[in-house]
Amino acid sequence: MELYIIITIVVACVLAAIGLIVGFCLGYTRLSCWGGTVVGTALICLLVDRTNVVPEGDWHGIIMLAVAAGTMLVLTLLCNLVRWYLARQVNKSKQLSFYRQHDEIEDNEESILIALDKGDKKAYRRHSSRRFSQKRGAWGVVDRVFGALTLTINIFTAVALVASLALIIIDSAEITVARDALLDFYQSAFWQGEGSALAIDMLVISLMCVCVRSGYNGGILSALSAIIIIALIGGAGYLAYYLVFDVQAFASATQGVYDSLLAAPLANVQESLSGAGLTPEVLGGAIVTAGLFVIFLIPAIIISIFIPRAFDKLRNFATVEVVDGALGAIILTAVIFGILLFLGALVWQIHDLEGFEIFNSYMANSYVANGLYGDNGITTLTFMQNLPLRQWVGLE
């Protein structure tokens, strides 16, 4: 175990050095603060749960998920405000630096023109190669220090998430070799206490963070665009089907298509096909429907080309982009976690199945993730309790 501790410390030092150096070079305004958001949300939710701010009850877990989502949104907003303020101050410092060097820049440009007139290549190279850097000032230093801290936190958070997932899988799946090697860690006070809870909850919060960011970047307009395109294609198919099978004027066309294309090839098997419900009207109608669908599909495709472009132009407006992104983040997060809540409620119905003991202990110790599982209010609904899942797996 001592070897593992030494390796962990060495790797941590290397990662910290990389994060500090690269983050200092990039600056906070060019980085995402997702790592700090995930860790901050996890710690705040831990505090909320341990101080019993949220009352116990059937819906305690879902309320904690809502608290986590709200906390993450607030922290993301604060990070973005800090980024905007720093970027503004750095730009002001760069502008001030430019104005202070304005006379020197003009003199240098004049020297370049004089060197060109005289054909003095040496003077031209000397003056044209001169660079006037726009200094970022004290705010630039603040930006770089924040960048170093932010990237370091992001790196350690990413490593912690991967390690957490591996540790939970090894323990829950009872992978003997790896579990025995890490037995001292699994039995440590940290892992038995808040460590395991933070591990599994940070995974859930990270998924929530991905949903929010993906939803914001994609927006609701992109989903609406896809829905309209699918509706156009589906509408073309339905219209073709309706005209052929419900409009009497197409009956003669259907019979004519069958007589000219299918009657001779299918003469020997027509009785068998009719017995299966594939009458001449159905077969001829299928061909006419396919032809009409292709014809109707052409204008649908043409319209579908312009819809995404129109929505992209609409999203160029700042207000529309913010509203669209916010709605996209809310809807995508709600859909994904709605699915997870339902699936978690299903799995909870068979939580006493053999092999679930370790996984159950992890979820029970958590304060956010358990809202998808044992602390899931959906499990108390009548229709969920009446599902025959337990009978299917032989528990009842």
Image (spheres, rainbow, N blue to C red):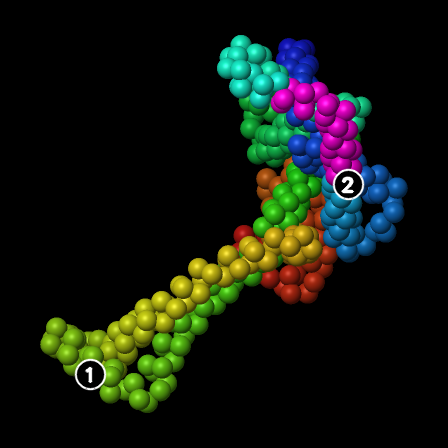
Residue beneath the point at 64% across and 65% down: 383
Q: Report the quarter where the N terminus lies.
A: top right
- Between disc 1 and disc 2, the foreground one is 2
Residue identifier under label 2: 81
Res 303 seen here:
yes
- The crowd level at tag 2 (other Cα within 10 Å; few <14, some 14-19, many 20+) is few
- In the image, 56: left or right of 4? right
Task: Judge whether residue 298 is colored magenta.
Answer: no
Residue beneath the point at 56% across and 56% down: 313
The image position of residue 350, as x and y in percent, is 61, 50
Residue beneath the point at 60% across and 55% down: 315
Q: Looking at the picture, tell me which residue is in the foreground, 225 or 72.
A: 225
Identity of the amino acid at label 2?
Leu
- In the image, 297: left or right of 34? left
Identity of the amino acid at label 1?
Gly
- In the image, 350: left or right of 201? left
Q: Give the range drawn in magenta.
A: 83-110
Task: Judge whether residue 88 is colored magenta.
Answer: yes
Q: Earlier in the sequence, mark 1 or mark 2?
A: 2
The image position of residue 225, as x and y in percent, is 53, 60
The image position of residue 386, as x and y in percent, is 63, 64
SS of the residue under disc 2:
helix
- The crowd level at tag 1 (other Cα within 10 Å; few <14, some 14-19, many 20+) is some
Q: Quadrant of residue 275?
A: bottom left
Res 191 seen here:
no
Residue identifier under label 1: 256
Residue beneath the point at 40% across and 72% down: 236
Q: How many labels does the image show?
A: 2
Q: Report the quarter where the C terminus lies.
A: bottom right
Q: In this view, does 285 lie above or below 48?
A: below
The image position of residue 341, as x and y in percent, is 65, 53
